[in-house]
Amino acid sequence: MRYFLWRKLCVYGAFFVILTAPGALFGEEMGNRVERENGIRLIEAVKIAIEKQPDTLITEQQVEFSKGQLQKESGAFDPSINVGVSHAANRTPTLPEGSTVRRDATTGSVSVDKKLRTGVTLTPSLEVGRVGEGGEIAFGFTETPVVNRASVNFTVSIPLLRGAGRAAAGADEMAARVNVEASRLDLLFQVSSSIRQTAQAFWQYRASLENLEISRLIEKRARQLLDNIQGLVDGGEQPPSDLNQLVADLAQKTSRRIGDEQALLVARQNLGIAMGLPYKEIVSLPLPADPFPEPVLRDIPVQPSVDVAGRSRKDLLASKERERIQEILLVAARKNVRPRFDLEFKAGYAGLDEGGEISNYWGALYSNLSGLNVTGGFALEYPYGNNARRGDVYQRLSEYRRVAIQTADLERKILSNVVVAIQALERSVLALREARESVAYYKKAVEGERLKLLLGMTTVVDTLTLEESLNQALLVEVGAERNYADSVVNLRFEMGILVSDHGELNVISEEQLTTIPQ
């Protein structure tokens, strides 16, 4: 009899310790939810993603490609130097028999073609030639003096219709330059997307870790409860049938813990992929170090936030730049649908020198100069029907309208998303407060229910039901914390203020990732 009384007192004492210990119901045992020293931090994960994320690296190459395209289009206005040298030696038989006329000609020329961005073409040129003639006859050789001729000219070609003006002649280069800016904005938007993806994956990793910790504590408490009820059953204080429910409950809690362990592995993989890590670094990725940010409830003005998004969203700005590209090309197509009508003016002088020496060859440039030679004219090309260029106008107009519609649609969605993101953030704060209050009251209720079970005033089923409600409340609290952290990042993303327009891409602070924008 004394043995059973002593056993009962030990079991009751164990219950009392469990109920009154500071960590009995997720008190001190949840202390591991705070910052870890050896884990990975959010800001570290984000900076790695900026440097290694494949989508970001691909977009960087698109920027380089657009720069190459600009350089290619600028090449149309590079000066072109043309150099030519020729020598001809001709022998022509003549009568009387045995006579031959000899003609030697040497010509050298150099010219530079330079097309201006207004469509005007400038061509300075220089040409020097030498001609020597002689005759071989049956009884000797006769030769005329060597003549050296030179000419220097400057030609200007001015388009008056097709190709006239910067908007027509320089359209491709202007479009390419705007495309470089659009590509740069694409890169900033991709970086912003990578930051959001990485931050949300980080918070999911954190939530999975806390869910696993909760599951382990739930399993531990279920095992403790089973052990203590087993003691009461052995002491004759509880019916053996109560053990069946507790054994089943422990198996369920163990199964949940195993599932949460797998969920943690999946969350780790998702974070590693979002960061752009190779396989070996993903499998060794440490646990998250940063805790969830503490919620702050304050009014966020809607219209100013919408205005910021309209000015700052990089994808919207890039779309507007591409709309501008199509406008540039459309204007050029409309100008170039006209016939080609060019005026051409040439002015220059000619020189002459006699002699077979090198000095005579170059002396033609400044010897025996004639007056100013001037030539003027025009060239007209009128394609009948002009279907090719008219079709190009229709295509450009259609493309411009398509991009304009896309831009307007994107702007409409972005501005609407900002409003929803603000509402989501405000509600996430309220939801988190309610979730924490729910956990606090459920903890008190479970403490009371366990005490009632100890005194025989309730059943095991009622106790387990209430504890399961506490378990669900704890998981809801973790989910609410994750939703708040995600909402902060998402609002900054929707407003376009995760990254700056200037400076290095990886210059980002933890404050930008965890605080509500001012």
Image (cartoon, rainbow, N blue to C red):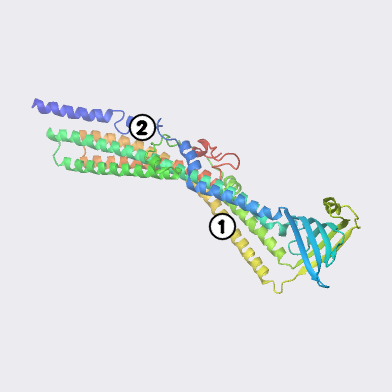
Q: Is residue 456 visible?
A: no
Residue behind mark 1: 409
Percent of width and height locating residue 120: 77, 58
Residue lying at 76% horizontally and 59% vertically, measured from the top left: 87
Look at the picture and state if 216 lies above or below 117. above
Residue at mark 2 to residue at mark 1: CA–CA distance:
47 Å
Residue 385 figure quarter: bottom right
Relative to 256, 268 lies left or right: right
Residues 151 and 161: in front is 151
Q: Of all residues shown, which one is farthest toward the left?
A: 1
Mark 2 and mark 1 lie on one chain; the one further toward the N terminus is 2
* Element at label 2: helix
Residues 39 and 465: in front is 39
Relative to 103, 190 lies left or right: left
Residue 319 figure quarter: bottom right
Residue behind mark 2: 32
Residues 358 and 320: in front is 358
Look at the picture and state if 53 lies above or below 139. above
Q: Is residue 109 visible?
A: yes
* Element at label 1: helix
Identified by mark 1, the residue type is Asp
Dot 1 surroundings within 10 Å: few (below 14), some, or many (20 or more)? few
